[in-house]
Amino acid sequence: MRTAFVNLARRQMAMIEQEGSEDDRLRFVEARLEHAAKLSASGKEIEAKKLWRGVIELYGSKPEFASHVQRAEDALHPKEANDGDVDGPPT
């Protein structure tokens, strides 16, 4: 199932790259992240994780998507994203 999702995302990415500008691609990835957040908030964690993993796999090597990839990684691993809190652990 995961392979099917990644293949679909790759086809969509290729289509956007052929037809659109970098801004279009950034908006597309932003929309995917927003959709994943909505899925997660509505209890559809598995579907959300698929989208986040897809963003990481497809755009992880593209510097212009670094902030999007970081958001996907933070969403997949929320504890690790909070490890750098300045407040420290509760006392």
Image (tube, rainbow, N blue to C red):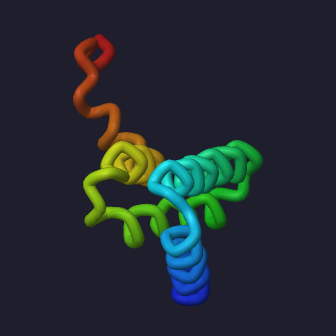
Q: Which residue is drawn at 67% across and 51% down?
A: 35
The residue that appears at 32% across and 15% down in the rendered structure is: 90
Task: Residue 31 in the image: state x and y as whole percent.
Answer: 63, 50
Residue 69: percent from the left, percent from the top?
38, 53
> In the drawing, does residue 25 fall left or right of residue 34?
left
Q: Residue at x 54, y 86 (%)?
A: 7
Q: Of residues 4 and 41, which is closer to you in this image? A: 4
On the image, the x and y values in percent for residue 60 come to: 31, 63
Q: What is the tally of numbered marks visible in this picture?
A: 0
The residue closer to the viewer here, 30 or 76, is 30
Q: Is residue 74 toward the left or the right of residue 19 in the image?
A: left
Eyeballing the image, is 79 above or below 12? Answer: above
Of the 4 image quadrants, the one containing the N terminus is bottom right
Nearest the camera: 59 or 52? 59
Indicate left or right for 89 with 46 as reference: left
Q: Give the residue displayed 49% in from the left and 70% down from the top.
A: 17
Residue 67 locus on image (x, y percent): 36, 43
Depicted 32 relative to depicted 54: above or below = above
Q: In which quarter of the image is residue 51?
A: bottom right
Q: In which quarter of the image is the C terminus?
A: top left
In the image, 15 versus 69, the foreground residue is 15
